[in-house]
Image (cartoon, helix red, strand yellow):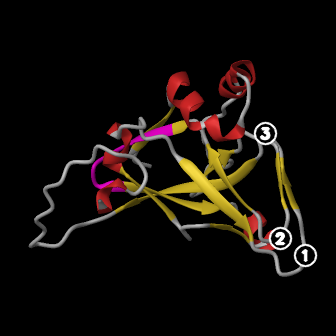
Amino acid sequence: MKAVAKFEKVSFEQFKKDFADFNMSDEDICKIYENIKLPHRATVYSAGYDIYSTLNFTLKPGETIKIPTGIRCRINEDYALFIFPRSGLGFKYRLQLNNTVGVVDSDYYGADNEGHIFVKITNDSNENKTVDIKEGDAFSQGIFLQYGVTEDDDASGIRSGGLGSTSK
């Protein structure tokens, strides 16, 4: 298999900034940061790299949470990282990404937020099921896919911002 990317942690400063919504002490954020697990495949033939939660959380039906993963990814220029919920969580709980599929472009790595990958999920259970995720549990997965461009492509913009910045 061809290597097309490398996962890394974002800096502690960036992680702390992005964790501000959770109203935790610097000490607690530091412990969480130290425990971040970089994504990896569970088996030789797994397509997806498991992405791990940095938090313990419970989602009742209809509830949503945005998880700062603490990771970023350097990706070859003709590839992108596509993020999906873990299959089992989607099947059992209808756990869904709020943007349906996350797309991480190769130039996101150099964004102002260091390319920090967030995953925003909702428990869309119609069977009244509550999902519990613990810190360190795999809750989503990323798959690298190659893409092409049209013959008349004329994109010339340069990314600077983070999430949603290319449409501004």
- The residue singled out by tag 1 in the image is 128
State the separation of the CA atoms marked 2 and 1: 6 Å
In the rendered structure, are the residues bearing label 1 and label 3 in contact, judged by CB atoms less than 8 Å apart?
Answer: no
Q: Is residue 131 left or right of residue 100?
A: right
State the separation of the CA atoms marked 3 and 2: 20 Å
Instruction: Examine the rendered structure and indicate whether residue 125 appears above or below residue 155.
Output: below
Q: The magenta stretch spans which residues?
A: 72-79
Instruction: Examine the rendered structure and indicate whether residue 67 appears above or below residue 148.
Output: above
Q: Is residue 77 magenta?
A: yes
Q: Position of residue 122 (x, y in %)?
A: 71, 65
Image disc number at residue 61: 2
Q: Is residue 3 left or right of residue 60?
A: left
Task: Identify the amino acid type marked 2.
Answer: Pro
Q: Earlier in the sequence, mark 2 or mark 1?
A: 2
Foreground: disc 1 or disc 3: 1
Query: Which class describes the residues within 10 Å of circle 3: few (<14), some (14-19), or many (20+)?
Result: some
Residue shown at 56% from the left, 71% from the top: 100
Task: Identify the amino acid type marked 3.
Answer: Glu
Query: Which class describes the residues within 10 Å of circle 2: few (<14), some (14-19), or many (20+)?
Result: some
- The residue singled out by tag 3 in the image is 135
Q: Determine the main secondary structure of the stretch shown in magenta.
A: strand
Task: Identify the amino acid type marked 1.
Answer: Asn
Residue shown at 85% from the left, 64% from the top: 60
In the rendered structure, are the residues bearing label 2 and label 1 in contact, judged by CB atoms less than 8 Å apart?
Answer: yes
Residue furthest to the top in view is 27
Query: Which class describes the residues within 10 Å of circle 1: few (<14), some (14-19), or many (20+)?
Result: few
